[in-house]
Amino acid sequence: MNDNLIIAGKSYSSRLLVGTGKYKDFAETQAAVEASGAEIITIAIRRSNIGQNPNEPSLLEILPPSKYTLLPNTAGCYTADDAVRTLRLARELLDGHTLAKLEVLGDPQSLYPNVVETIAAAKTLVAEGFQVMVYTSDDPIIAKQLEDIGCVAIMPLASLIGSGMGILNPWNLQLLMERVQVPVIVDAGVGTASDAAIAMELGCDGVLMNTAIAAAQNPVLMAGAMKKAVEAGREAYLAGRMPKKLYSASPSSPTAGIISSVRS
Amino acid sequence: MITVSINGEPRQFPQAISIAAFIEEMGLTGKRIALERNGEIVPRSTFATQQLADGDRLEVVVAVGGG
């Protein structure tokens, strides 16, 4: 069955997108990304440590753009201006690569998105030719506005970044998905495999996570678990679950032909 | 003598130099970096021809792990 995820016209067989932060070293990053099966991986753009460790390997040597679709993000930006500048630098760094993750945060405690700044940045970036995958709240009206601006994927939080609290408001995610045509990817909040499966069972097109894998006791094992959970959740969604009911008068085994101690 | 801000830190150079020469002096030649000067991207293709000027603010960035 061909059930690929299509983002901005490009087809991906994996519906799990992973971040590359918070790992203990590059070897662990590489092993976890590999085990996740992810094809799209997020990276951050940061000031170079000038004059320090000139021979330090770079992230792009272990996760080369030839093998992965890199998704530079604007994590840590609190204004539209900073987010736009960061992605312009990313585009230059990655030789004109235009697919990017926009994220403009509201405050450093919650890391909740600032949707006003996010919308402003999205308008500028789309006008400059970026293909914007946008991190946002689970507000369906804002999501629709971001789609109308031209974002190529809407990425609502399921709970706060790094919280591992799981899918706190499945109803809002459903409202959002009803209004948006572009792929909807849950970004933030997944804590363990069942959370990823729930997001996919709801009908989300994909899941993006970082901390749930990187902060697991065994990140590489968790990366594999997340791969299976996303696949399982997707298949369950496509299969269509049975209706829930309090009890059933229809047992799984035939009601006819049961042996009986009572002669009739 | 010119003074240039690099990633927020002031740095002095005896004379105006090209951005390519600056990158070499910083040990960044051949590294995958991107450079912003006074808020504007400096395309890699122009590194050899652009000169640093006194008071320039440079941001030099790399890709790192992140979510």
Image (cartoon, rainbow, N blue to C red):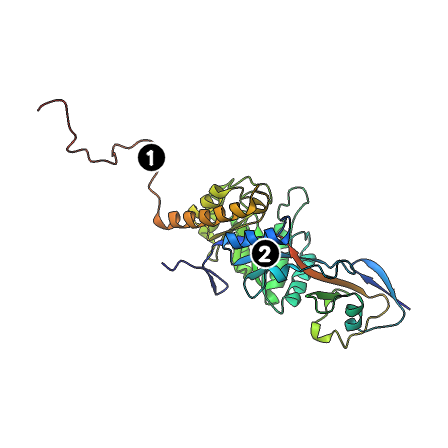
Please identify the quarter of the rendering in which residue A51 is found.
bottom right
Furthest toward the top, the residue is: A262
What amino acid is labelled 2 in the image?
A: Thr
Furthest toward the left, the residue is: A264
Verify CB contact (< 8 Å) between mark 1 and mark 2.
no
Please, which chain is the residue tagged with disc 1 on?
A
Name which residue lies at 74% across and 64% down. Answer: B39
On screen, residue A106 above or below A71:
above
Nearest the eye: A188 or A115: A188
Task: Report the residue marked by disc 2.
Answer: A42
* CA distance for labels 1 and 2: 41 Å
Quadrant showing the C terminus of chain A: top left
Nearest the eye: B51 or A193: A193
**Residue B11 position within the rendered picture, expressed as x and y whole percent measured from the top left:** 85, 62
What amino acid is labelled 1 in the image?
A: Lys
Q: State the mark number for residue B65.
A: none
Nearest the eye: B41 or A174: B41
Name which residue lies at 35% across and 44% down. Answer: A241
**Residue A50 position within the rendered picture, expressed as x and y whole percent measured from the top left:** 77, 60
Q: Nearer the viewer, mark 1 or mark 2?
A: 2
Task: Report the residue marked by disc 1.
Answer: A245
